[in-house]
């Protein structure tokens, strides 16, 4: 039987030992774990994408002119730098238009006006794990949670709240599986530890918020489904 974690200093250190990557340490944390967030990598990708794409675009003149003038018949002299140039433009566009976000109702991702996808927390029917990311499923829709790059504390808080009154599939464990309760408790412990481990100063200064988080770690007496 999996017991609820006690959110003490020692527990937070142990839970955080596997999540101390450089990306996580560089995340910009919100003032409150339940603040809505909008994430962007524009500060990094726009300067890199702009400089490299412009530089490679100018460099492309030389292999193209040599090929057109017949001084070279190697098509790869155009294709290879052309692919690198395209990749740099993709980085630039990603920085300019790619956004991710979460509020109390939903988690979402978009690319300008070309693409938008959201998953509402009340509709989640499966929580999955991918390579260095979580996956929230609702029907046929999936939104990735890149927990290394961005502060998704509100996602974990909302998942804890959802698990207080209803069941949904947790990775490969269905809601009617005998192991679901233990799996759910393990996930509650994981979500709460992730929030607490990176916000110990906040919770030390706001004991009422720590009490709330500790309450959400406990299993409910019943579910609606």
Image (tube, rainbow, N blue to C red):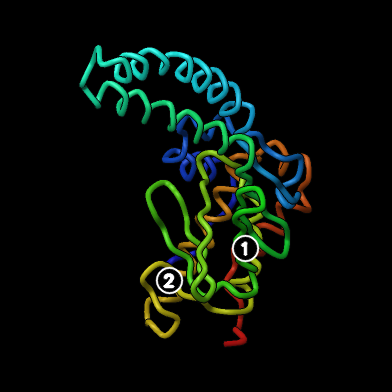
How far from the left and from the top, in percent, is residue 141?
52, 68
Taking 66 as reference, is 17 left or right? right
How far from the left and from the top, in percent, is residue 163?
59, 71
Q: Do the residues labelled 2 and 1 touch (CB within 8 Å)?
A: no
Quick one: 27 or 115, which is closer to the camera?
A: 115
Taking 49 as reference, is 170 left or right? left
Quick one: 216 or 138, which is closer to the camera?
A: 138
Q: Residues within 10 Å of mark 1 (few under 14, many from 20)?
A: many
Callout 2: SS = helix
- Who comes first in sequence, dot 2 or dot 1? 1
Residue highlighted by disc 2: 182
Q: Residues within 10 Å of mark 2 (few under 14, many from 20)?
A: some
Res 150 quadrant in image: top right
Callout 1: SS = strand
Residue at coordinates 48% horizontally, 45% vertically from top-left?
15
- Would residue 214 be seen by someone viewing this image from the given angle? no
Look at the image and tell me in which quarter the C terminus lies: bottom right
- Pick out the residue farthest to the front: 69
Q: How far apart are marks 2 and 1 (CA)?
A: 29 Å
Quick one: 18 or 146, which is closer to the camera?
A: 146
């Amino acid at each position: 039987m999996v017991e609820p974690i006690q959110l003490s200093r020692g527990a937070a250190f142990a839970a955080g030992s596997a999540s101390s990557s450089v990306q996580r340490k560089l995340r910009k944390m919100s003032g409150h774990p339940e603040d809505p967030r909008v994430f962007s990598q524009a500060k990094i990708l726009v300067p890199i994408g702009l400089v490299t794409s412009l530089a490679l675009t100018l460099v492309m003149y030389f292999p193209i002119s040599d090929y057109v003038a017949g001084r070279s018949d190697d098509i790869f002299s155009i294709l290879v730098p052309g692919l690198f140039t395209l990749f740099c433009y993709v980085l630039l566009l990603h920085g300019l238009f790619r956004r991710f976000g979460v509020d109390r109702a939903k988690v979402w991702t978009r690319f300008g006006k070309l693409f938008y996808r959201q998953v509402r927390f009340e509709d989640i029917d499966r929580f999955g794990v991918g390579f260095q990311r979580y996956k929230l499923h609702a029907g046929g829709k999936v939104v990735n949670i890149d927990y290394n790059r961005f502060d998704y504390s509100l996602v974990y808080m909302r998942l804890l709240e959802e698990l207080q009154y209803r069941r949904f599939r947790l990775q490969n464990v269905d809601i009617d599986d005998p192991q679901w309760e233990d799996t759910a408790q393990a996930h509650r412990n994981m979500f709460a530890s992730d929030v607490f481990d990176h916000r110990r100063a906040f919770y030390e200064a706001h004991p009422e918020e720590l009490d709330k988080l500790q309450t959400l770690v406990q299993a409910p007496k019943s579910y609606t489904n």
